[in-house]
Amino acid sequence: ENIGTVVYENSTTASKAVAQEIADLIRVKQAQKQPCILGLATGSSPKSLYAELVRLHKEEGLSFKNVVSFNLDEYYPMEPDSVNSYVRFMKEHLFNHVDILPENYHVPDGTLSKAEIANYCDQYENKIEALGGLDLQILGIGGNGHIGFNESGSLQNSKTRLVALDHITRVAASGDFSGLENTPRTAITLGVKKIMEAKRVILLAWGERKSNIIKASTESEVTSSVPASFLQEHDNATFVLDKEAASKL
Ligand code: GLP
């Protein structure tokens, strides 16, 4: 078990520490005249991280000009300008407030026809590979242990693909979509394999409601029924937690 857990007083202090690590990485890559390849996540957990990165940009001159980012997932179908799209989320919380170049950020396309998806997903992975892989992957965790939208049953070598969302994932999202009947049934997600290939992985979890799944992910056996448990086999993965999320460890 290689997984590290780091516990902070609260999500704000935790997010500041993670933002500092990302800022340091971006600056190292800048000094090397290299792009910094980031895997980014949505959901409520990374909001405070993005807020801190925006602050570092505005107040401390952190530039994102060398950042190339790949988001983990997007609902399918989904229009990019829809209120619940992850494109919109990322613009609202990060991209619109920093100097990342629009051609350098990528969010899976929720507007494709079904026939186009498989090829699109292969190309999404090829783009990451052509850049040398993800330098750092940020993750949240679903209440069922999903990472990205790799739900229970996702294999460790799973590729980027269209997936069916679990009922409990849809219930969790249904508030945003004003009811379960309007909540998407499918999504496009980066596969577990590309997440595991990231050179560094940081999973963020806050609050008591995540405490059981954090315990299962870090202390139980590695199992596809809890995809976050695969991170036990990553040699540079850290779970960054607040006290409440860590309370069952
Ligand atoms: C969604 C996202 C996941 C995220 C999860 C947890 O399902 N697709 O990537 O980790 O929500 O969300 P939250 O951070 O709001 O608990």
Image (cartoon, rainbow, N blue to C red):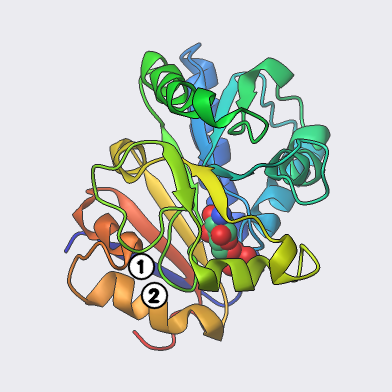
Residue 11 can be seen in this image: no
| Contact check, label 1 and label 2, Cβ < 8 Å | yes
Q: Is residue 57 above or below residue 133?
A: below
Task: From the image, tell me which residue sits under label 2.
Answer: 214
Q: Residues within 10 Å of mark 2 (few under 14, many from 20)?
A: many
* Position of residue 92 in the picture relative to residue 215 (left or right): right
For ligand 1, tell me if the residue under mark 2 lies within 8 Å: no
The residue lying toward the viewer, choosing from 158 and 248, is 158
Is 52 on the left-hand or right-hand side of 243?
Answer: right
Q: Which residue is mark 1?
A: 5
* Foreground: disc 1 or disc 2: 2
x and y percentages locating residue 93 in the rendered image: 76, 46
The location of residue 41, given as percent across then percent down, is: 57, 48
State yes or no: Cβ of the residue under disc 1 lies below 8 Å from any atom of ligand 1. no
- Residue 239 point in image, percent of width and height: 40, 63
> Which kind of residue does numbered mark 2 sit on?
Ile
The numbered mark, 1 or 2, whose residue comes first in the sequence reads 1
Q: Amino acid at mark 1?
A: Thr
> Dividing the image into four equal quarters, which quarter contains ligand 1?
bottom right
